[in-house]
Amino acid sequence: MVASLEPRIAEVTNELLDDIDGTGVDLVESLAYPLPVIVIAEMLGVPASDRGLFRKWADDLLTSQNMDFNDPKFVEEAKEKVRDLDAYLLEHIVARRKQGRDDLLSKLVEAEIDGEGLDDGEITNFSRLLLVAGHITTTMLLGNAMLCFHDNPEAAADVRANPTLLPSAVEEILRVRSPFLFSARITAVDTELAGTPIPANKMVAPWLLSANHDERQFPDPERFDPHRDPNRQSGFGHGIHFCLGAPLARLEARVALAALLNRFSDIEIADPAAVVYRESPGMYGVKVLPLEVRR
Ligand code: HEM
């Protein structure tokens, strides 16, 4: 399904880029936010024109300063924050139960394993995860790509001259400036990590960013090297919960960065002091990224 989306991703990217030229272009507003949200909304089958609402709901959820998973208040607040989004999704799910369409929500409504389907609550949870995880992270990846290129002009020129490097450059951006900083797990048994005892049944937050800068895994870890091979970066997590959307995020990043580099001979961060970072303990990326671009 993801591979077949490439032409549509290229089309949306080009439409968005048609509106860009000159100084003071905010990359987030003009490309990095709308592209992934339009793609995931169309895939699910909810109107992409409602993206202002998705942004508000996702921002509310992801800018929580309390990320203490062991705190019951955190869970209560999170439930409160997803209430409107869930009600919105449920409306679409109920409509698909009456009349299916060619979209992912309809497929989830129709899906059965051993004759058993998913109930409304399960589909709401899963489509919320897809909608929220499916756009903000890729928005950050695209912004982080520009920051990596800005900090490493020689590497950026190399990628521009050799577009076949784009897939490995995307892996290196995910490693150096990982959008998702940590994941969360519950310990199954009493254990010890680097000399620190951790009891069973405790929530822990393994830092993906730290793993991605581990010099035992990545020689010269602070260096941005689009040729890095092997690059076993953990930006999409690890193990059984490895990011379901990784193929889509990689495709969107490759298509969007190729289009940006193709269209503009020069891309600069207009004023580094005007870059606004997201204030979230768990996510790393920009909210506002003013660029100066020349065709
Ligand atoms: C650059 C973009 C993205 C990054 C950095 C990213 C990162 C991650 C990470 C680190 C995890 C693992 C969380 C954990 O282990 O607890 C994850 C899981 C997940 N991601 Fe992504 N993601 C991205 C894009 C996407 C997209 C585009 C989608 C949907 C289309 C998506 C859907 C999911 C889902 C459904 C899971 C949960 C998988 C599971 O629990 O089995 N992600 N993502």
Image: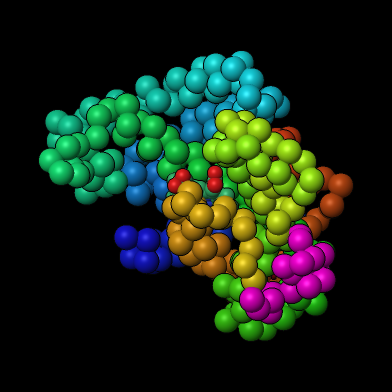
Lateral position of residue 121 relative to residue 160, left or right: left
Residue 42 in the image, given as x and y percentages of width and height: 36, 47
Which portion, as a residue range, is magenta?
213-230
The residue furthest front is 190
Q: As drawn, is 262 to the left or to the right of 49?
A: right
Residue at position x 31%, y 34% in the image: 123
* Whether residue 32 is visible: no
The answer to whether 218 appears left or right of 246 in the picture is right
Q: Residue furthest right?
A: 273
Give the quadrant of residue 186: top right
User: The C terminus appears in which quarter of the rendering?
Assistant: bottom right
- Residue at the image position 39 percent from the left and 44 percent from the top: 41
The quarter of the picture where residue 236 lies is bottom right
**Most common SS among magenta residues:** loop
Check the image and report above or below for 279 versus 183: above
Residue at image location 72% in from the left, 67% down from the top: 217
Q: In this orientation, does residue 91 appear?
A: yes
**x then y, percent, for residue 247:** 46, 62
Viewer-proximal residue, 123 or 97? 123
Q: How many marks?
A: 0
Please tell me whether residue 21 belongs to the stretch shown in magenta: no
Rendered position, 233 above or below 96: below
Across and down, in percent, residue 249 comes to 51, 57
Q: Nearer the viewer, residue 249 or 46?
A: 249
In magenta segment, residue 223? yes
**Who's the residue at 62% across and 58% down the image?**
234
Q: Position of residue 135 (x, y in %)?
A: 51, 46
